């Protein structure tokens, strides 16, 4: 008679034959976990540390809110406003991506880099670090950042404008195209050009140039640059320097236009960095406080997202900074530009109205100077706000304030420049 062995069910220890086998297996699992943790820690320690920087989200600290400021009023000639140290919370810059080992802001000779090439990563990291420190000694300055495709045809007007300014109240930095010759030593723009990179409109390269200009101005410790105004060779001031200086120094917000654009600009994936509803568009020609300049040069996440994924109808120079600042600090920007441009012609193409000699007269500038609503800017042209509820110009919380400090576009034709130079000081203020 054949006996058939029937397998028995596993006991309380499951498939382990003895208690010893069970404990040996548990010990092996624990050892594997400890080994993995040690190995992971070794990998972390072998990488450069992360630099933690504080980012306070909210309004800029302005003259009216600053407890440590000494400011004798809007008409004062001795402006010694001092802002408390600004820090940037929850923004982390990996050292390995942005700075060479051992580098720091102190290692950067800014005057040297006006003449030689320098990596963007080195500049941006050091500039972001510099922006979190107290403002350098000296009168707070406006840094004028010129992005140039050609020599400045309106240079005589700018010379006239700066002639009314205290040299301790402004700085100039230019990024010329590769083929532009240096300015003569008699020019206010002489020796103010940073090292040049190739740039294309609507491209990430134009964003790179903006960030490079901001970085140079932030790192220039010989100048207490508090405000940063982006301008082009087709742009001109429509106010006197003292007016513009006081307008900036008394403002509690940066002047960055950031409106929700038409649907055709929204056909790309913005998550997980930000929601599509947070996408913003606006003029490249913006003006920002030192605090926001530090946020722009210190950003990593938004920049990489735009560079990698922003494609269809994506004008990076008109969307990246606008979206960044709207998302991180919506109350800190005035949601408008202080540079006038006329987009009212439905057949404008990719550029606003060009003001030729036949259109240049005192009435044109009085119209621009007296504007308290943005009636013909890019917002009116490409915003999804069809009722145009944001057209009023707000200054320090006051709606229907005077809007503009600069205007564009003006050609470089000799007749147009001559017509501008004939305008009396009573019209432009300089």
Image (cartoon, helix red, strand yellow):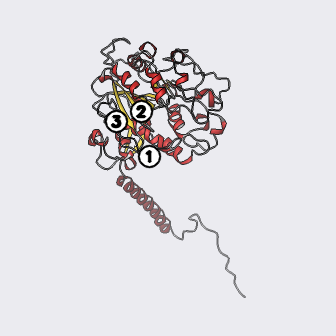
**Horizontal side of residue 258 vs 188, given as left or right:** right
In this picture, is 17 found above or below 279? below
C-alpha distance separating marks 2 and 1? 18 Å
Q: In which quarter of the image is residue 173?
A: top left
In this picture, is 212 found above or below 61? below
Q: Residues within 10 Å of mark 3 (few under 14, many from 20)?
A: some
User: 419 and 209: which one is in front?
Assistant: 419
Per the image, the residue denoted by label 1 is: 198
Element type at mark 1: loop
C-alpha distance separating marks 2 and 3? 9 Å
Rendered location of residue 20, percent (x, y)? 47, 68
Q: How crowded is mark 1: few (under 14 residues within 10 Å), some or many (20 or more)?
A: few
Q: In which quarter of the image is the N terminus?
A: bottom right
Of tags 3 and 1, which is closer to the observer?
A: 3
Residue occupying image coordinates x 65% and y 75%: 7
Residue 183 is marked as 3
Per the image, the residue denoted by label 2 is: 152
Residue occupying image coordinates x 68% and y 76%: 6
Numbered circles on residues, count: 3
């Amino acid at each position: 008679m054949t006996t058939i062995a029937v397998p028995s069910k596993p006991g309380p220890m499951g498939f382990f034959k003895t208690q010893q086998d069970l404990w040996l297996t548990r010990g092996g699992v624990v050892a594997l976990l400890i080994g993995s943790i040690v190995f992971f820690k070794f990998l972390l320690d072998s990488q450069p540390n992360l630099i933690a920087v504080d980012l306070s989200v909210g309004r800029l600290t302005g003259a009216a809110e600053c407890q440590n400021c000494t400011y004798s009023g809007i008409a004062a000639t001795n402006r010694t406003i001092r802002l408390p140290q600004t820090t940037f919370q929850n923004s982390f810059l990996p050292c390995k991506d942005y700075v060479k080992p051992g580098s720091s802001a102190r290692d950067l000779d800014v005057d040297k880099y006006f003449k030689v090439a320098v990596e963007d990563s080195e500049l941006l990291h050091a500039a972001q670090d510099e922006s979190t420190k107290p403002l350098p000694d000296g009168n707070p300055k406006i840094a004028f950042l010129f992005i140039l495709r050609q020599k400045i045809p309106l240079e005589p007007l700018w010379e006239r404008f700066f002639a009314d300014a205290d040299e301790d109240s402004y700085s100039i930095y230019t990024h010329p195209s590769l083929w532009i010759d240096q300015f003569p030593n008699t020019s206010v723009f002489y020796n103010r050009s940073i090292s040049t990179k190739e740039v294309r409109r609507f491209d990430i390269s134009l964003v790179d140039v903006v960030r490079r200009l901001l970085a140079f101005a932030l790192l220039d410790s010989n100048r207490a640059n508090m405000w940063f105004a982006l301008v082009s060779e087709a742009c001109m001031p429509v106010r006197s320097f003292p007016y513009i200086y006081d307008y900036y120094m008394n403002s509690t917000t940066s002047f960055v236009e950031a409106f929700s654009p038409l649907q055709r600009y929204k056909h790309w994936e913005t998550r997980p960095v930000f929601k599509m509803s947070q996408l913003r568009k606006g003029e490249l020609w913006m003006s920002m406080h030192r605090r926001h300049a530090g946020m722009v040069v210190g950003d990593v996440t938004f920049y990489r997202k735009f560079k990698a994924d922003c494609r269809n109808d994506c004008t990076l120079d008109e969307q990246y900074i606008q979206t960044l600042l709207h998302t991180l600090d919506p109350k800190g920007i005035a949601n408008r530009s202080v540079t006038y441009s006329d987009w009212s012609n439905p057949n404008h193409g990719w550029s606003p109205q060009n003001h030729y000699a036949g259109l240049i007269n005192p009435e044109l500038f009085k119209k621009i100077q007296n504007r308290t609503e943005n009636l013909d800017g890019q917002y009116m042209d490409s915003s999804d706000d069809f009722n145009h509820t944001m057209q009023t110009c707000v200054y320090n919380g006051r709606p229907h304030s005077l809007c503009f400090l600069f205007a564009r576009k003006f050609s470089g034709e000799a007749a147009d420049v001559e017509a501008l130079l004939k305008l009396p000081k009573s019209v432009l203020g300089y």
